[in-house]
Amino acid sequence: MPEQPEPGAGLDPEAEDAAAAALQRARAAAREKGLRPGLKPMRRRRPGVDGSRANRDGRDPLLLGDQMDRLLVDRGWQVDVAVGSVMGRWPQIVGDEVAQHCTPVTFEGGVLTVRADSTAWTVQLTLLESSIMQRIEAESGKGTVSALKIVGPSAPSWSRGPRRSQGPGPRDTYG
């Protein structure tokens, strides 16, 4: 079997170096363009465009997270879910020490009501209201909770029974 000459045999060393450098430049340019010499070309995907033809009629399956997002948007539950996550993660949002002394009670009309366990903590939470609102906005999004209502411990109810009389009550004996 005859011996094959080496590639570049018979060329002067300068021409061989120039050819190798040109080959390296061509390969680098091809890699930058996304071409892969010797392999099948890859299809490019445009960002934000789904390349498949699935879901055109709505009958094809979706990922569970996408389906849940669609359900929340269709029902208008985004705000309720966001506020529910704030109420569920209250200790992580306000910190463990503050969470020991107050709990979120209700959310109506964009107002989150928080009940403190003492009047001292009611005053403290009133002073911390702006920082608590910033943390709630960071967790649930801007505009989810429009106001924070902080209430103290509840007083006992003096009205008992199905019927009650209007007028002087149990606290009128000192007059």
Image (cartoon, rainbow, N blue to C red):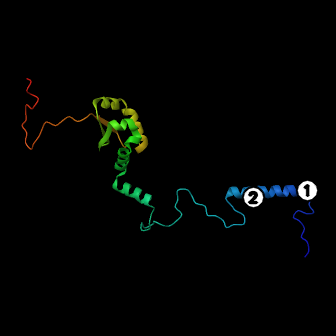
**In this figure, which residue is indicated by the disc labeled 2?**
27
Q: Residue at x 89, y 65 (%)?
A: 6
Q: How many marks?
A: 2
- Residue 135: percent from left, percent from top: 42, 38
Question: Horizontally, is 5 left or right of 119 in the view?
Answer: right
- Characterize the local packing of mark 2: few (<14), some (14-19) or many (20 or more) Cα atoms within 10 angstroms: some
Residue under numbered circle 1: 13
* Mark 2 vs mark 1, CA separation in Å: 21 Å
Residue visible at 83% across and 57% down in the picture: 20
Residue shown at the point (34%, 49%) measured from the top left: 80
Residue 121, placed above or below residue 160 = above
Whether residue 46 can be seen here: yes
Q: Is residue 150 left or right of residue 21?
A: left
Choose top left, top right, bottom left or bottom right for residue 18.
Answer: bottom right
Q: Which mark is residue 47?
A: none
The residue most toward the top is 175
